[in-house]
Amino acid sequence: MFTIAKTEATRGIWSAAEQPLNAPARGMVKVDVIAAGICGTDYHIYSWDSWSAGRIKTPMTIGHEFVGRISAIGEGVTGYAIGDRVSAECHIACGECHFCRTGNAHICEKTSIIGVDRPGAFAEEVEVPASNLWRVPDAIPDTHAAVFDPVGNAMHMVSTAKVTAKNVLIVGGGPIGLFAAAIAKAHGARSVALQEPNQARAAIARSLGLDLVVNPREPDAAAKILDLTDGHGPEVVLEVSGNAAAINAALDIVAPGAIVALLGIPAGPVALDLGAKVVMKGVSLLGITGRRMYETWYQVEAFMLKNPDLMDKVITHVLPAIDFAHGFELMDEGACGKIVLDFQALDQRLPI
């Protein structure tokens, strides 16, 4: 079985041959992967930064954004059939801890993540709990269905930050930032600005019809954002870059009482003047992780069904799975939006 895996504790990602999966265990299903998205988390693992080096146990088949068809069903599974087209929530919650039992499974104390803590979906087949499956409507194409997960991150962030009628600044124009921008507009934000230094991604952002797209490295970037917000600064910041300087710059210009939602994973500790930038301005910081199970999935499904054109603008590349290395090179260069790997035409021969 062809897989894409982290086989060495160093920068890079490699193909690997694994034995086909056994029959699924009780409560589990086996899914033949059709397509899978390359996530920012996968890029962290590829880059082998401090977060991934402290979390990933090699060898590990990575990948957690996917769509596929059920090929085998374990004992005790009901409501699904062989051939059903599904995606899946990649955070496997324990269902027993305080947070799971109070409706907050997205912050489960014992979360196990597909492609991070257990074998992932960058493979011809993946095993997942039936309880985590999401049946995909026929009207949603495979390339869109493969990225329920990151659109869910963006949806969770936008919904939690309550953007309606607010001036919103999105920090970072990667795929989740682009999805968040489109969702914020759909949620009735007063204005949506996005800052991104990479011109290829800035061009994608402009195609979404945002009120302002600005290069944060330009000296008048802050002035443009303040002008858009009548001098007050953004009332909501959606931070998806994980860049320490960008986080600090955003906090410098936010309006008093602003909400700052943080989803980007910094490469290391971030120095922050909490007194001046947060406490005295009455700013609320929100850590965003995962998706609410499964409220966010219903919201994402509705968004995808109503906005296929926006999905197509953010998904810029669909590559054969065998060409995964090119996908990571494009991410290195910042020359892409969302990348989806196609596993359907895989000939099962490893690249030389």
Image (tube, helix red, strand yellow):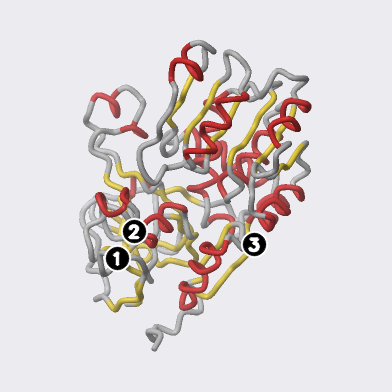
Q: According to the image, label 3 marks what residue?
A: 316
Label 3 sits on a secondary structure element that is strand
- Residue drawn 55% across the image and 72% down it: 319
The circle drawn on residue 48 is 2
- Residue drawn 22% across the image and 31% down it: 96
| Mark 2–mark 3 distance (CA, rounded to whole Å) | 25 Å
| Mark 2–mark 1 distance (CA, rounded to whole Å) | 6 Å
Residue at the farthest bottom position: 352
Q: Residues within 10 Å of mark 1 (few under 14, many from 20)?
A: some
Whether 16 is drawn above or below 184: the answer is below
Q: Which mark's residue is nearer the viewer, 1 or 3?
A: 1
At which x and y percent is residue 6? 30, 66
Q: Which mark's residue is nearer the viewer, 2 or 3?
A: 2
- Residue drawn 55% across the image and 67% down it: 330
The circle drawn on residue 10 is 1
Q: What residue type is labelled 3?
A: Thr
State yes or no: discs 2 and 1 in contact (Cβ < 8 Å).
yes
- Number of callouts: 3
Q: Quadrant of the C terminus?
A: bottom left
Between 189 and 112, the one lying in front of the other is 189
Label 1 sits on a secondary structure element that is loop
Q: What residue type is labelled 1?
A: Thr
Q: Which amino acid does label 2 sit on?
A: Trp
Which one is earlier in the sequence, the residue at label 2 or at label 3? 2
Q: How crowded is mark 2: few (under 14 residues within 10 Å), some or many (20 or more)?
A: many
| Mark 1–mark 3 distance (CA, rounded to whole Å) | 28 Å
Between 21 and 325, the one lying in front of the other is 325
Determine the image quadrant of residue 92: top left
